[in-house]
């Protein structure tokens, strides 16, 4: 399991929170620049993979500035979406964005730790996250929590960077992530450390097979991961039995 931490800090949980607190104001702009604006489409793919039933309750874990929660509420006009995050300055930006998108009535944002979700068992019809798994200090515990709060028959879905299988794409994405992204990150966010952590944490992250094993341990049945961007991204999907 990854022990890569921002700024080489000893405590990953605290360092990740500090890092997102520092870059919150430039986080959305950095996402658009780094992905060429494709990140919205990837979030829509993630939301579709969650297969929320009509009128369902959805949870976005590590919502950050709210983009996945907002995309979920926008693409499903019957969904009620809760977004949680433990970094105050990221979360503080989400309600105004939901308001501007005229989705405030069906989106709620709260400060909480993904390792200890403040919800009863089986509270949600689907749980999703985008670019959060790499950041957990205890991925096994976080998956156990997501599996606990989803209803039987519901899905736990996660969009995350992963190492491409092809040597060519590993090299191409490696060059982009390791050489280009830290420079854009330093210039735009003023925090080169945050955007050196991104490629380092991605390189150390488990493959889809590794994530499938963690899902099984959490009591979820993994479905085949959907790979995007020549295998540089994966949408991991697990279902909770019953329902
Ligand atoms: C890369 S951002 C992703 C934000 C958003 N999901 C998106 O698609 O843009 C990762 C987010 O995960 C949050 N996060 C990391 N560990 C967390 C934890 N243990 N509990 C809650 N949020 C966490 C961070 O605060 C940060 O806002």
Image (cartoon, rainbow, N blue to C red):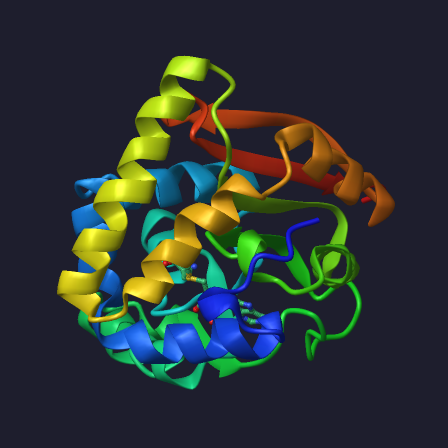
In terms of depth relative to the viewer, which is nearer, 146 or 163? 163
Tell me if 189 is positioned left or right of 214 in this view: left
In terms of depth relative to the viewer, which is nearer, 81 or 85? 85
In terms of depth relative to the viewer, which is nearer, 179 or 120? 179
Q: What is the x, y in percent for residue 86? A: 52, 79
The residue lying at 21 percent from left, 65 percent from top is 101
- Any part of residue 77 in sight: no
Q: What is the x, y in percent for residue 38? A: 24, 39
Image height check: is 150 above or below 48? below
Q: What is the x, y in percent for residue 62? A: 50, 65
Q: How many marks?
A: 0
Q: What is the x, y in percent for residue 160? A: 49, 43
The residue lying at 33 percent from left, 42 percent from top is 178
In terms of depth relative to the viewer, which is nearer, 192 or 95? 192
The quarter of the picture where residue 188 lies is: bottom left
Q: Residue furthest front?
A: 8
Image height check: is 210 above or below 136? above
Tell me if 62 is positioned left or right of 11 in this view: left
Q: Residue furthest left?
A: 187
The residue lying at 34 percent from left, 69 percent from top is 65
């Amino acid at each position: 399991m990854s022990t890569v931490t921002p700024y080489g800090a000893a405590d990953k949980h605290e360092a990740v929170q500090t890092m997102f607190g520092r870059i919150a104001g430039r986080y959305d702009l950095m996402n658009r620049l780094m992905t060429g604006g494709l990140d919205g489409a990837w979030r829509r793919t993630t939301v579709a993979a969650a297969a929320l039933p009509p009128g369902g309750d959805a949870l976005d874990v590590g919502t950050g500035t709210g983009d996945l929660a907002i995309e979920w509420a926008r693409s499903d006009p019957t969904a009620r979406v809760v977004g949680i995050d433990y970094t105050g300055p990221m979360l503080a930006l989400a309600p105004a964005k939901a308001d501007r998108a005229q989705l405030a009535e069906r989106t709620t944002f709260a400060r909480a730790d993904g390792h200890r979700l403040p919800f009863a068992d089986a509270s949600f019809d689907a749980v999703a996250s985008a670019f959060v798994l790499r950041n957990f200090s205890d991925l096994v515990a976080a998956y156990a929590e997501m599996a606990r709060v989803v209803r039987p028959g519901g899905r736990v879905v996660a969009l995350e960077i992963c190492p491409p299988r092809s040597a060519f794409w590993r090299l191409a994405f490696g060059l982009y992530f390791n050489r280009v992204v830290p420079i854009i990150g330093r210039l735009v966010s003023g925090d080169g450390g945050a955007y050196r952590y991104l490629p380092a944490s991605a390189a150390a992250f488990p493959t889809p097979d590794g994530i499938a094993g963690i899902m099984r341990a959490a009591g979820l049945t993994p479905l085949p991961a959907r790979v995007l961007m020549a295998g540089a991204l994966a949408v991991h999907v697990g279902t909770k039995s019953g329902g």
